[in-house]
Amino acid sequence: MAMQRFLIILGAPGSGKGTQCKVLAQNNPTWKHVSTGDLFRKEISSGSEQGVELKKLLDAGQLVPDDTTMGVFESQVDQLISSEKVDFLMLDGCIRTKAQAKFLKELCERRSSEFKKPTIVELNVPEEVLVKRLTGRLINPRNGRIYHIIDNPPKVAGICDEDGGPLVQRGDDKEDVIRKRFQIYRNERDPILEVLDEQNKLIVIDGNQDTSTVTQLLTEAIKKLA
Ligand code: ADP
Ligand code: AMP
């Protein structure tokens, strides 16, 4: 059976996790992007009852409960690995608490013939840069495309280059909510590393550089693991 490796992409909100994972997945067909945030936003867009509950949590900058998140996460992973060849599963925002880190560790132990030990990559960006990025972020909730009003604008203001539909500001990209999300990240980062980093070397990348430079650094780091 083919073995795949989880790459846990850590980094505060706005550090470029989604932007980078989307480019890396496009450039490397066996590297898959898994974003629990994107999955939750899709559920919200569907107008389901669960979506209504999720929207309250996301807009307030609160975490979704661990059991809900890990259920959504594992079924997405299973769906991806059952349909195509996968070398890396790039986990963007999927592991956000100590309990989720333990869940992933146990999943790898339970299914050790499928998953190699996870590797952790962290994108480092100063918080004041992140506030500028997040307050200017626009997204297409239908396909997950990410823009920035100044640094990465669409060709036509407010319209996605890809599907021609409207771009929106995320409900949680407001400065007070952004500060709360930073606080959660600061509190949870070390406990996650404690659980997962024991035998693994954390790869830290300076995320405060051009998008293409960060992509190049990530690509080199990941290819070394292959
Ligand atoms: P995350 O997924 O970590 O929350 P995103 O990938 O959504 O972060 O990026 C947040 C915002 O920052 C977006 O508006 C994106 O266009 C912008 N951005 C991402 N990477 C860079 C970069 N290297 N330089 C400048 N802006 C960036
Ligand atoms: P993101 O798109 O990664 O910035 O996530 C947006 C929001 O979705 C977070 O602020 C949380 O409310 C929720 N979320 C995404 N992933 C997780 C996770 N692993 N655990 C708990 N909540 C999550």
Image (tube, grey):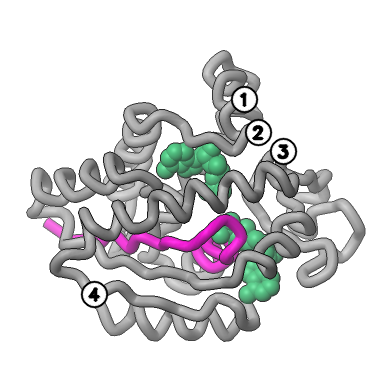
Q: Mark 4 points at which residue?
A: 201
Residue 5 part of the magenta segment: yes
- Residue at left offset 84%, top offset 68%: 150
Q: What amino acid is at disc 4?
A: Lys
- Residue at left offset 70%, top offset 60%: 131
Residue 59's label in the rendered image is 2
* Disc on the earlier residue, 2 or 3: 2
Mark 2–mark 1 distance (CA, rounded to whole Å): 5 Å
- Residue 38 seen from this side: no
Say whether marks 2 and 1 touch (CB < 8 Å): yes
- Residue 44 seen from this side: yes
Give the residue at the far right of this rendering. 157
Mark 2–mark 3 distance (CA, rounded to whole Å): 5 Å
Q: Give the range drawn in magenta.
A: 1-22
Q: Name the residue under label 3.
A: 171
Mark 3–mark 4 distance (CA, rounded to whole Å): 35 Å
Mark 1–mark 3 distance (CA, rounded to whole Å): 10 Å
State the quadrant of the N terminus: bottom left
Residue 56's label in the rendered image is 1
Mark 4–mark 2 distance (CA, rounded to whole Å): 34 Å
Q: Is residue 172 left or right of residue 149?
A: left
Image coordinates for residue 101, horizontal then vertical, percent: 27, 48
Q: Is residue 66 left or right of residue 194?
A: right
Figure quadrant of residue 120 = bottom left
Q: Residues within 10 Å of mark 4 (few under 14, many from 20)?
A: few
Q: Which of 73 and 104 is in front in this view?
A: 104
